[in-house]
Image: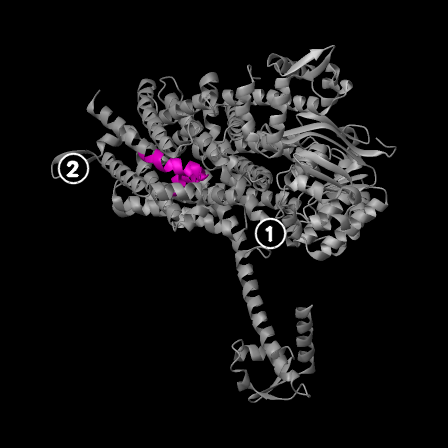
Amino acid sequence: MNIQEYFELVWTDYTLRTITLGTAVLGAICGMLGSFAVLRKQSLLGDAISHAALPGIALAFLITGAKDSGTLLLGALVSGVIGTFWIRGITSKTHLKSDTALGLILSIFFGFGMLLLTFIQKQPNANQAGLDKYLFGQAATLMESDVRLMIIVTGISLFVMLLFWKEFKILLFDADYTKTLGFNTKFIDVLITFLIVLAIVLGLQTVGVVLMSAILLAPAAAARQWTNNLGTMVLLAAVFGAFSGVFGTAISASQNNLSTGPVIVLVAGVFVLLSFIFSHKRGLLFREIRFRKNRTDLKLMKTLQFMYGIAQEHENISHPHAIRILNNFHGFTKSSLKKLEKEGWIAIEGQQWAMTPKGYKQAEEMYNQKTT
Amino acid sequence: MSSPQIEIQLIAAIVAMACAIPGVFLVLRKMALISDAISHSILPGIVIGFFVTQDLNSPLLILLAALTGVITVVMVEFIQKTGLVKEDTAIGLVFPVLFSIGVILIAKNANDVHLDVDAVLLGELAFAPFDRLLVGVADWGPKSLWVMGSILFITISLLILFYKELKVTTFDAGLSSVLGISPLVMHYGLMSVSSVTVVGAFDAVGAILVVALMIAPAATAYLLTEDLKKMIWLSVSFGVFSAISGYWAANFLDASISGSIATTLGVIFLATYLFAPKKGLISVLYRQKQQRIEVSLITFLLHLNRHEEESERHINHLQEHINWQAVRARTVLDLAEKNNLVEIENNVVSLTEKGLAFTEKSLEYIISNKDEKIEPMKEDFFLFRG
Amino acid sequence: MDTQKLAVQIDDLTVAYNYKPVLWDIDLSVPEGVLMAIVGPNGAGKSTLIKTILGIIKPIAGTVSIYGKPYSKQRKLVAYVPQKGSVDWDFPTTALDVVMMGTYGKLGWIKRTGQKEKKIALESMEKVGMLTYKNRQISQLSGGQQQRVFLARALAQDASIYFMDEPFQGVDATTEIAIINILKELRKAGKTVIVVHHDLQTVPEYFDWVTFLNVKKIATGPVKDIFNDDNLTKTYGINYKVAVNK
């Protein structure tokens, strides 16, 4: 199956439709809530939480023997929350810094999870629960019930987000101020964190614990470059996330032997790269162009100033001068003279230039601006 | 114990030592997560190196992969400098993308690359003894033992050579430039050593365990000491101990060795986190409670000292004005009485001579911003602590 | 005390950070309608005092009351301008949006801002001369403009008491004059304004009331009565003259 066939089949094939819908919804909720994680400078908390979820999945299987993703994700949720609280405990009660706490919890929980997984695999009666898919994600294993769960959780998150939009926004911007206004900041804080953990857990089956955090960050980081409005950013991040999900799934489904997680991450990574470069507001390309333009403008203005200095000494400001008297001034080139002429600030005749009244006025204004 | 068993433990112990040393500096420099980033992003370097050399233990592959690690650091720093996203987001974006490229490279070339993604994440220590270094026909032992042994040797040599410089740049970057030590050189030096160590170790213990081996021993040691030399020794000991006991636990459970080592590290950290004598959770909570009561006590004494009028010194006033719960007020009052700092007559509290001396002395320290001197003073005055 | 109404009353207040004392046993009464500076050296606990009054920090002992009742009951009477450096100015939002946040307190949970709130916000922006910048992203404002936005946000709270944490830090001279004029207008309207202030030289010119603070309260009262060398020395130690000459 190639990608084209995939998109033709999406509308008719039941399984494909389910998977695609699932990854689209997942990408959307991750982009949406990821925006909050990014703005709270909690980008890497997601990474720690997703790794910390692994032992929960394994334990849930060991205890219940259940294979359905609902039970396993509940286990993931519990161990993810434990990991989050432990990270907070470490940073608030000891002098260890947050980077150490995050790295520590991430690697230790993951190691413990792997210990359990390998232990399960070697149990004689284990029906090989297919827990491997939680490492890198396998969208193909999504079932209708999983997708329904995703849609319900996304719906609830969306509702909560819209309901508390004002509170979320003000807490993200200025937590102390929010407290003085009488809002219970702890409640809002826990609510946002819980929603983020929920989104992470929801994505484990599709994207896997190892790369889950990237799906949270990348769409938000890309969206941030295009807008200065929180609402637009969240919306855009949801759209980028959904596209990454769908394209990633399409590509991985059309290839053999590819987990969905890495492909979705790469698609999202492309969004980020393009946004970093081409965004009209903050992008590196436009920044460079603007920088160059400013530099040429500055050169032009300096030349004009220099000419103004010469023209001032004559009664007739439009008295022509030889171009070569500009030679000891380094700011000018042929092209900059042409530009000045195009602006109507000077007139060039043969080897001579003369200032126009318009140019004189322009230079005078600049001169005044400088002195005040 | 069979000979492969001994060899596995030896490799594990050496890997643990090699990781613990740079780990200490990463933790102290608040760069612990860089090890996480490097351990993931070296993957494409390893895969490409493997195409070239066809040998996971080749020095060339290690250098190529370590280069990817350093490139990661440079990329993260570049993105941070653009100011387009926050620092932590920059790390969080770079390494998953590089890691994904690595995973996809492996999957697309599964027939040519005998690398398995699970093995990359987990390593397979149990197989390490089977890849042997043969010189002619002589068997020189497992290759990874040699690789990690060399890395450990280099790390220790660099540590001894540049100990002073590392210490200064870690604790006081400003001073280091005055002394003519470039923090930048030390920074990239540390990054390079970390990258090489991660690459050398990943094949034995996997990408994630490398992170555990780097951060967990150092974090545990940091809860026990703040002396750099002691911290390095403790980290190395914790690493080696976890490596060996983790191995036996895995043997017993018939499960992943690296997962078991990480779990052991976690258990040791948890125990230290709870029970460390000064920095542990229990000790911190106990001290906080004690401090809270003692700070309240001083507040109370100051209040008595400042107010002559009896109404302000009436027992009931404690609750009303100072706004304390009844229990807390009782505890504070009891403590003050037990220490002979106050006396109570007709429900009116007054300072004793000792109480007055204590109060005036602490007041002096408070105003001159020498709060730290109050602590030793308590030792002199208090018979009972809060 | 006297017959004048007390806007803020603090009794026996002690605050500690990590059980290190920052403020000790402070009694302070601020009469209604004054424009008061809180001065003191770095680490004297000036910001801490404000944050404790506003309930951001919990004290170890003591009480704070606003017009005779605890802060939690009088929130709507109080507005706050935090230090400019305390927030992330790269946050994706506009100046108007930030000013609108001043109306959130009266709105309470969940309710959305409407035309009424927008009108209040726009009026506040006009007062601080920022109306033309209302749709600017906040990172594209200068330091002085950012401070004006913060002031406008507090004005939108329409309070009786205004607390400001170093509003003159890192602002240009024009903004400083604009801000102090607004503060004086607030006083004229009968409001109480309490400002953490650094520049001792401008105290007599800007304020009519002053509190000297250095872990303990040194003195409080009208500027003309108590702003003297004696209190300055008590607060800053022997070197206070150097500070003034700066």
Q: Which residue is mark 1?
A: A226
Q: Secondary structure at mark 2?
A: strand
Relative placement, left or right, of B180 versus B4 is: right
Which residue extends farthest top? B346
The residue nearer to you, when weighing B43 against B338, is B338
Relative to A339, residue C119 above or below: above
Q: Main secondary structure of the magenta part?
A: helix
Q: Secondary structure at mark 1?
A: loop
Which residue shows up at 54% across the image and 52% down it?
A: A275
Q: List x then y, in percent, for residue A191.
A: 63, 30
Image disc number at residue C41? none
Q: Which residue is mark 2?
A: B134
Q: Is residue C167 rendered magenta in the image?
A: no
Amino acid residing under circle 2: Leu
Magenta region: which residues? Answer: B18-42
The residue nearer to you, when weighing A330 against A297, is A330
Which quadrant of the structure image shows residue B304? top right
Q: Is residue B37 rendered magenta in the image?
A: yes
Q: List x then y, in percent, for residue A176.
A: 67, 37
Amino acid residing under circle 1: Trp
Which residue extends farthest front? B353
